[in-house]
Amino acid sequence: MIELQKMDIVNIKQCGDIHLRAFRFETSDDYAEHSTELSDSLRKCYDFTHYFSRFIEDYDKYAFCIISDEQIVGYITALEIPSLVDDNAIYIDSIAVAPEFQKKGYGKEALTQFMNMFPETTTKKLQTTKDRPAYKMYKQLGFIDMELQVMETNSILAKIYNENQALKQELAELQSLMER
């Protein structure tokens, strides 16, 4: 049904486009009509060349295109990380399947093939949330929900979070005034 093929530099733009579409970065109903210009503007926010190049070039990182009928339908990126259980664990950084190929088993088969490349590595990890459509698939493949709270620091995220909190407070105050 599918095969995994090592990603190379010429695949980066197509895999970046799949990422944007798979994770629903389109912002309007007429996305198809404006997809090129929207993709170009979103692409400026994401440095796909830098991201994918690291997975292509580094010896302990992996980047594979998911191929079906000689067409790229998705990608997987992963890296080896230190582990207390194994010499190294495999951390799946990202897996994306183009929307028109989702819910057809491509992601599940690709992830299974990928994990089978590392039979000696018993620990394979990924990060997701329960509201993601692929969450159920990960559980079916044997991933266990560790229910860990992920915390992150990032000046841009902190600014957005603080602005969001301020807007929530302002909205609550406005609602309170309206109720009077």
Image (spheres, rainbow, N blue to C red):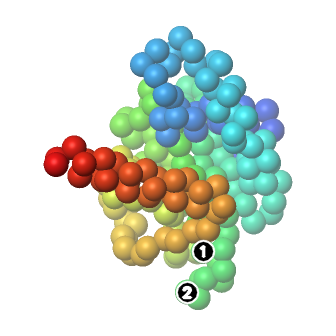
Q: Secondary structure at mark 1?
A: strand
- Would residue 70 appear left or right of 138 to someone viewing this image? right
Picture coordinates of residue 36, whole percent (x, y): 64, 18
Residue 154 located left or right of residue 147: right
Other residues around mark 2 within 10 Å, as few (<14) / some (14–19) / many (≥20): few
Tell me where residue 4 appears, x and y as whole percent.
Answer: 61, 44
Please identify the quarter of the rendering in which residue 148 is found: bottom left
Separation (CA) of disc 2 from disc 1: 8 Å
Q: Amino acid at mark 2?
A: Val
- Mark 2 and mark 1 in contact? Answer it, CB < 8 Å: yes
Residue at the extreme front of the image, as rendered? 180
> What residue appears at the point 45 percent right and 40 percent down from the top-left corner?
106
Which residue occupies the extreme bottom position in the image? Answer: 84
Residue 1's disc is: none
Is residue 36 visible to the viewer in this orientation of the structure? yes
Where does label 1 land, which residue?
A: 89
The residue that appears at 49% across and 40% down in the rendered structure is 23
From the image, tell me which residue sits under label 2: 85
Position of residue 146 relative to residue 37, above or below, is: below
